[in-house]
Image: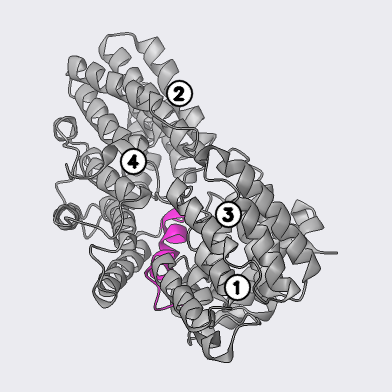
């Protein structure tokens, strides 16, 4: 029976088996794995096409696009290289393509008409054609699901083709509902990946997509072997150097996240120079935010400040996309909020001023959220109300193409700022009710891959509010819930320690204090609450 027809229990068994394959096989494979894809193109473009496809599996879209274009230039009859170039425009797990990208993808696929190709190549091109059938961003979800259905047919028609299986698995991850906490689609994708991984354990798609399939609380440990192997399997990819940090962050492995992120930032800088890009490669900024998160969880505040300065020195990136927007907004916000510097957060500027923020209202909202929480928690309720009004205005600017996570997160930010305003107005019951509702709303939707975690978890803010009101036992319970989803969050550890102390649980308090201080042993001893 094909993996796609198995029940969740068997899918989980397959995922566990995949972990065993990684542990036994990938640690021994240090060489870069080159993907093989039999096609009808001329012999002198085969190596170029294989390299491009290898990079495509690692989401190295700019370089993969160049190589697919090189294959077309050398062999104008190479239809499948045009398919590859169109694939680099989609970015299934990131943000929907722009109308211009959709039009370009359709143009590339239209060029394949009349070219000689195998039935298998034609099936790949036909499947992708349904995704690029419209340039309307509002139809993104329907087109992604249509592509998933088409790739299911390709996979079933070519069960001996590992590429068909992996691209079908990726389509399942692309259409997974972030509200589905059974993770049925992710388990189904993982089982398909396991099928390929049994024969090709070092395939970059196997390693990469396994990480994405299990990038969730309670599942991340299943991808740890893949995370440890992926960077070695694709050393020429800044994204591959970065991806292990997704799993390390989910497991609270701060030191490993720091090392992985630094490797990726360095790799991105080298690629920027090697490729002659007009601006900093965006993958480096993506890794900067993961590094910022990990540095702050270990109280390395001086290093975090240096990283923030380095981010501010980046005047231009190779592209103004959602990853860049998120990092520009989130990293400064994290730096102020994680250190609980409320007045600093209240004055946080939105930078750089030249960035097209109007194209990313959900990212801009992060700045207003930080300013609103900072204002409310430092007692400036009028300023907090102004930020709340701006957040509500930004919510109205979200388009139909905005991913569900960002839609929900902007509403969560609105509810969080409103709850702290209510608390400042002395409306404690309403404040606690609003803060709890925000926490429940945020927990109902899984995070987007671009972020290591919420800029400030709603449930942690709810726990803070409970503790401020002297409800220490309840606060302790909430901090512990935060750590179930975000292990080793420093402020949750410290909050739990103080809540336990306030609830009269001295031994529990001592344990949390010890854990926090061990985690921050190389950090800033002046971090609030540590000593």
| CA gap, disc 4 and disc 3 | 22 Å
Q: Is residue 219 left or right of residue 405?
A: right
Q: In the drawing, what numbered circle is on residue 140?
A: none
Residue that carries the numbered disc 1 in the rendered image = 80
- Evaluate if marks 2 and 4 touch, with contact meaning CB atoms under 8 Å apart: no
Sequence-wise first label, 1 or 2? 1
Q: Nearer the viewer, residue 401 or 392?
A: 401
Determine whether 56 is above or below 301 in the image: below
Instruction: Describe the element under mark 1 as helix, strand or loop.
Output: helix
Check if residue 176 falls in the magenta segment.
no
Q: Nearer the viewer, mark 1 or mark 2?
A: 1
Which residue is the extreme one toward the front? 114
Sequence-wise first label, 3 or 2? 3
- The percent position of residue 449, horizontal first and vertical second, equals 46, 51
Residue 293 visible to an observer of this rendering: yes
Q: Which residues are magenta?
A: 234-252
Residue that carries the numbered disc 2 in the rendered image = 436
Label 3 packing within 10 angstroms: few (<14), some (14-19), many (20+): some
State which quadrant residue 50 falls in. bottom right
Q: Nearer the viewer, residue 296 or 233?
A: 233
Sequence-wise first label, 4 or 1? 1
Residue at image position (59%, 42%) is 141
Residue that carries the numbered disc 3 in the rendered image = 219
- The percent position of residue 103, horizontal first and vertical second, equals 49, 52
Residue that carries the numbered disc 4 in the rendered image = 455
| CA gap, disc 2 and disc 4 | 17 Å
């Amino acid at each position: 029976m094909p993996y796609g027809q198995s029940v969740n229990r068997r899918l989980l068994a397959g995922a566990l088996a995949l972990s065993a394959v990684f542990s036994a096989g990938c640690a021994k494979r240090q060489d870069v794995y080159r993907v093989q894809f039999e096609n009808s193109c001329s012999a002198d473009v085969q190596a170029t096409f294989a390299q491009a496809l290898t990079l495509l599996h690692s989401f190295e879209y700019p370089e993969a696009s160049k190589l697919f274009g090189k294959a077309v230039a050398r062999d104008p009859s190479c239809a499948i290289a045009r398919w590859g170039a169109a694939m680099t425009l989609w970015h299934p797990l990131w943000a929907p393509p722009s109308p211009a990208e959709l039009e370009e993808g359709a143009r590339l696929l239209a060029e394949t008409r009349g070219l000689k190709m195998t039935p298998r190549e034609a099936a790949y091109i036909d499947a992708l054609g349904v995704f690029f059938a419209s340039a309307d961003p509002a139809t993104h979800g329907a087109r992604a699901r249509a592509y998933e259905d088409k790739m299911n047919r390709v996979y079933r028609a070519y069960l001996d083709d590992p590429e068909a299986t992996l691209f079908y698995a990726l389509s399942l991850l692309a259409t997974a509902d972030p509200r589905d906490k059974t993770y049925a689609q992710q388990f189904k994708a993982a089982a398909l990946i396991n099928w390929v991984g049994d024969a090709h354990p070092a395939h970059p798609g196997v390693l990469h997509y396994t990480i994405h399939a299990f990038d969730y609380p309670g599942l991340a440990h299943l991808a740890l072997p893949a995370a440890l192997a992926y960077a070695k399997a694709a050393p020429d990819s800044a994204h591959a150097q970065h991806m292990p940090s997704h799993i390390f962050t989910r497991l609270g492995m701060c030191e490993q996240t720091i090392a992985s992120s630094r490797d990726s930032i360095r790799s991105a800088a080298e690629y920027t120079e090697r490729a002659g890009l007009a601006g900093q490669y965006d993958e480096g900024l993506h890794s900067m935010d993961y590094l910022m998160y990990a540095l702050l969880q270990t109280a390395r505040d001086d290093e975090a400040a240096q990283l923030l300065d380095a981010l501010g020195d980046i005047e231009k990136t190779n592209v103004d996309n959602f990853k860049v927007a998120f990092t520009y907004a989130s990293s400064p916000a994290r730096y102020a909020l994680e250190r609980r510097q409320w007045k600093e957060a209240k004055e946080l500027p939105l930078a750089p001023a030249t960035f097209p923020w109007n194209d990313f209202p959900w990212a801009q909202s992060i700045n207003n959220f930080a300013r609103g929480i900072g204002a409310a928690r430092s007692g400036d309720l009028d300023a907090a109300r102004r930020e709340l009004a701006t957040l509500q205005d930004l919510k109205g600017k979200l388009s139909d193409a905005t991913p569900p996570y960002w839609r929900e997160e902007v509403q969560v930010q609105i509810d969080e700022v409103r709850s702290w305003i209510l608390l400042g107005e002395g409306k404690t019951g309403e404040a606690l009710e609003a803060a709890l509702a925000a926490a429940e709303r945020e927990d109902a939707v899984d995070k987007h891959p671009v972020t290591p975690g919420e800029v400030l978890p709603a449930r942690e803010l709810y726990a803070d509010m409970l503790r401020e009101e002297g409800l220490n036992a309840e606060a302790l319970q909430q901090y512990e819930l935060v750590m179930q989803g975000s292990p080793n969050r420093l402020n949750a550890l410290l909050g739990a320690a103080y809540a336990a102390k306030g609830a009269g649980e001295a031994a529990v308090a001592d344990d949390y204090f010890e854990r926090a201080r061990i985690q921050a042993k190389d950090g800033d001893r002046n971090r609030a609450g540590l000593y």
